[in-house]
Structures are given as structure tokens and as C-alpha cells.
Amino acid sequence: MSVLDRNLALIKNKQLRERLLHPINEPIDVDIHPSKKGPPTMKLNGHYLYSRYDPLKDAERFIDSQIDRDAHVYCLFGFGLGYHVQELLQKEPDKQIVVIEPYLSVIRKAAENIDLSNIFLHPNVEILCFEQGQAMIRTLNELAKQQTRWIIPNAWLKAMPQSHPLKRFLEDIKIQEMSFQRFSSLMEKNFAENLKYMDADVGKLFAKFNGQKAVLVSSGPSLDDTVYSLKWLKNKYFILSVGSALRVLKENSIVPDAVIITDPQEFVYKQLDGMGFAQTLIYLSTACHSAVANHKGLRIIAFQKGYPQAESYAGKKKLPLVDTGGSVATTALDILIKMGFSEIVLLGQDLAYSKNRSHALHSTSGVEVVSNENLLSVLANDGTMVKTTTILSIYRRWFARKVAETKHVIFKNTAEKGAVIQGMPFVHISEIISESEHLMECNFSEKINQIINQY
């Protein structure tokens, strides 16, 4: 009996076994060859899923970094050669392990070359292989209701084609998981401290600005070309600035109506310190607590989806949650939409390294001069190609999805050399200024205070 026959005979999932017995025609390239240490390694669509030198040690190190003793369920993406599953079984033998592999060819190739009996026979391991992405997403949504620890190897995610329906879904999960892993203890501390400082929750502002217009100011390189416009837009558009752009605005004698911060790290304190900004601060529940504590103006907290403590607290208090999308700008956009603005204009939202820079001059994020190595090329609003990164591309797709599902709002993008955001047309800043001339003025800072004082 061949290795394949022995493995297939042990698979508990009869439907999966039947599918593996028949010829498989999938548009992927799977290759297995010996590593320098001896055990086989796998290459999927041109990307190695494990180390070419010592795949077993590579899998052990990776799983060590993913263990969460509080998790009830582990959901591992990518079966590969089963190395990650084996490591999970050794370290968490009593936990349920759900393995999701989109490609039958990968499982078949592994079953042809490796003894997988321990995995196939183990009562706690469930292997799922879906032909349709939507079926898999429904399964993931069910898993999300449990205390699930998501494990998404970077190499596996890179090997998945951009066209796969799960790609974007998993990239979003990966962003959240990376953030929680790196800053979980800091986020917990920030959350506990930030509850002490809130004057109100952001839900008090929702649906209070219907029919009015807003500008979301980010600190991309194009802000240098458009920041002057805010002098004309002040009191016509509600101006919400991300923390890293505040210094740029100060250098141009512009005071925004509100500033938003979301990052848990201490560097956020420097974004506000010494700026003399005393208007409204909107802050995520897990944002840098020292920056919140130091603020002299109104402090409005936002509780985010995806963070258990925020969801629990908001649920008990019957407060709304906001979508974060992984960045301060994506969080800000969701909040502006919920506030009711009929038009939202983006300034400095390049989502690319236009001008070979990462940020506008004077931004507190610093100005990184970048090379073109290991960067992606995407279409810019001026018709040229511009360099960007995987993470910025994820944010760009988040913007596009949010725009697509928000039909009642007009979106405009002023970053001429920034990356194209699908559904968000480029509009030259001069047109925005011209259109603002007929708008009635509004003291937005005063309006926010009036709204909050009503409660």
C-alpha cells in the first residue's frame, strides 16, 4: 500500500477523502523537494511555505510564537506538509484545531510524500477544504464567535493569489492579529487607563452631521501640496486630522476641529505634545493612554470591533462600535460616515510612496526616503505608476470596500500622485475650494461641545 493510500484511508472526513481520490485540476503550482537538513519542504506558487534549510525547526519556532493558552480553538490557515499542525498537536494536544486549506492539490501532495496518520487520526483535528470562498467565510464567521486563535503564516498568505476570494479577508485578520500579538499587554493597560479620561463616547456624535461635509487629513506626501486649502475650508468642512498630521497643520497655522489617535504605542504622545491643540480628541479605547491623559480639550472615546474588552464594555453600556480597518485613517473614515457627513474629502491619503517619501514634511511620523526594492507598483491618480507596500495595499482595499458599501456618501480623493482608490474619484483641491464658497459656515468645535453637553 502506498503512502497516499494509507493516508487517505485514515481521513475522517469522508467527503474530503472522496475528493482527494479523484483527479484534481487547480490553477496552482505545488512543488516538494528535500531541504538541506533532509525533511521535505514545500513551494506553493513560487513561494516557500517553510525554510529551505530546516523546515521542521522553522515550523516549531513559528508555532511557539502563536501559542495562546486562553484560546479555546486554533484555526490554522494552510495545511502545507502538516508541519504546523504537528507542532500544534504537540504543544496544545487538548485544544480543537481547525485547519483550512483552499487547495486540494496541497493536501494530496502532502499525503503522497509524508506519513500524516497522527494528524488524520487525531480526534481534535478537523481539516476543511472548500471550493467556494463564501462557504469558507461563513465557517470563519462561526469560528469568530468562539475564543479562536487565528494562525496565518506569512509565507502561506503570500503564496495565495490576489484573485482568491479569501485573500482580502485573511489580510484583514492578519493585521488585527499582528497588532494584538505585539501590543496585547500595552493595549490592556491603555484600555483600563483610557476609561478614566473619557468625557463621552463617539456614538454621541453619530448621525448629528447629516448633510454637512468633512475633510479627513492624513500625513501622506501629497498633504504638502494640499494643506493650504484648509484655510479656505475651515468652518465649511469639518476637519478631522490624524495625529501624525497635526504638526503639518500647525506649521501652516491651521487648527483642525478634531484629532484622532488609535495606535497603542508611546510615540503617539509626541504627536500631540507641544502642539497647543485643545479642541476635540477622538481616541480608540486602546490608544496611547499618556497622550489621552495629557490632552487639555474634550476627550471622546471610540470602542472598536475586534477587541474583546472593547466589545464587552460597549455591549454592557449599549454603546456602538467602530470598524478600524487596521489604521488610524480607516478608523477615522468609519467614524465620519457614522457621524452622518454627506461628503468626505481625503487629504494626504496617498497609500503609496509618492515623491519617494512615506510622509509629508513636518509629519511626526518622520519622512522616510524609500527605494523601489521589494515594493509593489500600482496606478496613481495622475495616470502614472507609484510604489506601495503590501500593508498599504490592504488599507487601500479596505477603503474601496467601505466606499462600495456606503452609497449615500460622496467620497473625493485629492492625492494626485497617490494610489487610486476604487470608487473614490480624484478631484483637484482647487475644485474643492471652489465648491466650498457657497457653503454655510459652521463652528464645528462649538457644535460638538453642544452635542456632548446635551447628555
Image (cartoon, rainbow, N blue to C red):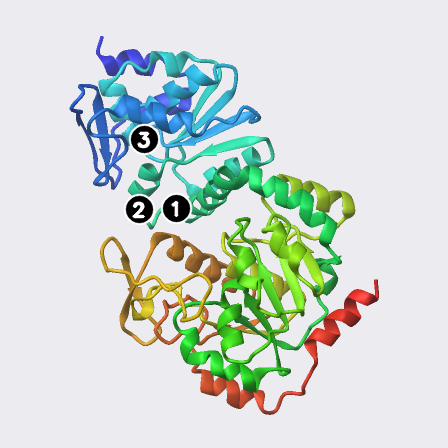
Viewer-nearest residue: 166 or 260: 260
Q: Secondary structure at mark 2?
A: loop
Image point 72% across, 64% down: which residue? Answer: 298
**What kind of residue is marked 1?**
Lys
**What kind of residue is marked 3?**
Leu
Q: Is residue 441 above or below residue 425?
A: below
For the N terminus, the quadrant is: top left
Q: Which mark is residue 167?
A: 1
Q: Is residue 67 above or below residue 44?
A: above
Q: Position of residue 354 (x, y in %)?
A: 33, 69
**What kind of residue is marked 2?**
Pro
Give the mark, 2 or 3, whose residue is nearer the N terminus.
3
Q: Position of residue 398 (x, y in %)?
A: 47, 57
Q: Position of residue 380 (x, y in %)?
A: 33, 70
User: Is label 2 in contact with label 1 (beta carbons under 8 Å)?
Assistant: yes
Q: Mark 3 — residue?
A: 104
28 left or right of 130 in image? left
Q: Mark 2 — residue?
A: 161
Residue 141 seen anywhere in this rendered image of the structure: no
Give the CA distance from mark 3 to mark 1. 17 Å
Instruction: Please identify, in this view, whether the residue under mark 2 or under mark 3 is nearer the observer.
Output: 2
Image point 61% across, 56% down: which residue? Answer: 291
- Callout 2 crowding tier (Cα within 10 Å): few <14, some 14–19, many ≥20: few
User: Is label 3 in contact with label 1 (beta carbons under 8 Å)?
Assistant: no
Q: Residue furthest right?
A: 454
Give the CA distance from mark 2 to mark 3. 15 Å
